[in-house]
Image: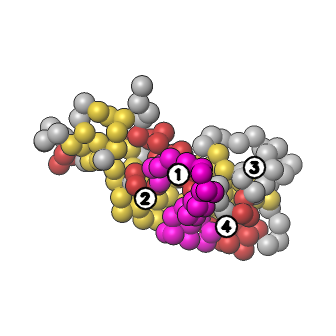
Amino acid sequence: MSTHPRTQIRTAAIALLSEIAALGGRVTGYRVDPDYELPSLVVSIADAGEGGDMVEPENQGKGNEEMHTVSIVIEIRDKKTSGMDNALDALCLAVEEKIESGPAPLPEPEEGEPEPAEVDTLADLVHDLTLSATTMEIEGKDIEQEVGLAIMKYTGYYRITRGSRGTII
């Protein structure tokens, strides 16, 4: 059974952004518990009404390919402190640099070890990925621990072949 393109894109984004040392591996594809250690990062695909995963109208019913516009939402959370804005800005910069540079190169295998399997990267899956918006806010004003939140929205496109929806081309 193939995997939906949104799942493939989200998985590739999580793998890429997990390389940001300041996050200590706290990168997920689901909403986190408020007790989760901060800073943390959540990767999701926006709903279609918010520019999420939409089939481009000029591609409906034409040929064997469909082009989809996709919006990847990255939510960065950190403790509210006097330096929170600077901390969130630094994490946003780390995300921007990581998305622009791509994944770290795989280490060369030791003699006699097999080559690592090729894995689709975010750049392989989504074309023309561009930062389209960043917003900052305070979350949890009604609870004991307020949290700073930076929301970054990246937009790009992917293509699939009709009849093989789980394969991004």
Identify which residue, 68 or 25, lies in the foreground: 25
**Which residue occupies the extreme left position in the image?**
62
Label 4 vs 1, first from the N-terminus: 4
Judging by the rendered image, the residue that carries numbered circle 4 is 91
Is 82 left, or right, of 40 in this rendering? Answer: right
What kind of residue is marked 3? Gly
To which residue does mark 1 refer?
115
Figure check: 30 above or below 135: above
Q: Which mark is residue 62?
A: none
Residue situated in front as seen by the camera: 36 or 112: 112
Disc 1 from disc 3: Cα separation: 47 Å
Gap between marks 2 and 1 measured at Cα: 21 Å
Give the label on residue 123, or none: 2
Give the image location of residue 156, x and y in percent: 38, 57
Q: Nearer the viewer, mark 2 or mark 1?
A: 1
Count of labels shown?
4
The residue beneath circle 3 is 140
Disc 1 is placed on an element classified as: loop
On the rendered structure, is 80 left or right of 47?
A: right
